[in-house]
């Protein structure tokens, strides 16, 4: 029984282990591969053989370099996409917080306005001047108009000349 075979029962692993110690490409070789890759990131067999001869390395090493370079470029693109999406998400989350605060502010203003109208309606009687015209306005129309003016940024209780009826 072969002692070497007993130590490594899978011959293909022995071969792979020996290939791991290939010499690294020089900076000049990498520059040549990079410039060729930038021209065309796909490698046809003829170009692979030509590059392997120019570089003095096996064609398989050229093919593996191209494959790894494509993978690195893809990962780099994904990282950029992730950063871009993260920035957009941060912006959307900030907008969400701002809008929630705005909703709370508007709800507070609406409740102040509703309580002001509530006290106005409860103190009015049918005999007072102007109360009949107020009663003709439906609550729905009033709330819709209030909402529209609040969303529009203005207050319905501030006159065009700047006088604030509730200020």
Image: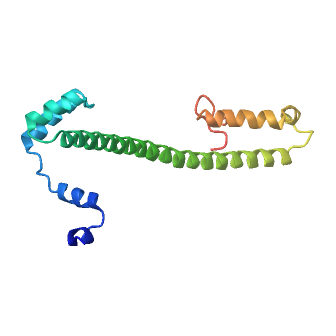
Q: Is residue 21 above or below residue 125?
A: below
Residue 98 coordinates in the image, percent (x, y): 52, 46
- The chosen color scheme is rainbow
Frontmost residue, 62 versus 86: 62
Residue 63 coordinates in the image, percent (x, y): 23, 39
Frontmost residue, 158 versus 5: 5
Q: Is residue 155 visible?
A: no
Q: Is residue 47 above or below residue 55?
A: above
Frontmost residue, 157 versus 83: 83
Image quadrant for the N terminus? bottom left
Residue at 14% over, 30% down: 50
Residue at 39% over, 45% down: 82
The answer to whether residue 121 is left or right of residue 4 is right
Question: Would you identify the image quadrant in which residue 6 lies?
Answer: bottom left
Residue 28 coordinates in the image, percent (x, y): 7, 39
Question: Would you identify the image quadrant in which residue 128 lies?
Answer: top right
Residue 83 coordinates in the image, percent (x, y): 37, 45
* Residue at the outermost right position: 127
The answer to whether residue 59 is left or right of residue 28 is right
The answer to whether residue 165 is left or right of residue 80 is right
Question: Would you identify the image quadrant in which residue 36 lies?
Answer: top left
Image quadrant for the C terminus? top right
The answer to whether residue 42 is left or right of residue 24 is right
Q: Is residue 24 visible?
A: yes
Residue at 53% over, 49% down: 97
């Amino acid at each position: 029984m072969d002692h070497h075979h007993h130590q490594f029962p899978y011959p293909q692993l022995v071969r792979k282990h020996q290939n791991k110690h290939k010499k690294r490409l020089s900076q000049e070789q990498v520059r040549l591969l990079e410039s060729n890759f930038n021209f065309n990131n796909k490698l046809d067999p003829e170009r692979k053989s030509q590059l392997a001869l120019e570089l003095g390395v096996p064609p398989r090493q050229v093919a593996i370099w191209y494959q790894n370079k494509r993978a690195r470029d893809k990962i780099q693109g994904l990282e950029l996409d992730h950063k871009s999406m993260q920035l957009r998400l941060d912006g959307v989350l900030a907008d969400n917080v701002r809008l929630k605060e705005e909703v709370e502010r508007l709800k507070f203003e609406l409740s102040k306005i509703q309580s002001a109208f509530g006290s106005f309606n409860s103190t009015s009687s049918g005999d007072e001047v102007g109360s009949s015209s107020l009663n003709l306005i439906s609550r729905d129309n009033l709330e819709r108009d209030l909402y529209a003016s609040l969303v529009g940024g203005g207050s319905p209780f501030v006159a065009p000349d700047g006088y604030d009826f509730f200020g």
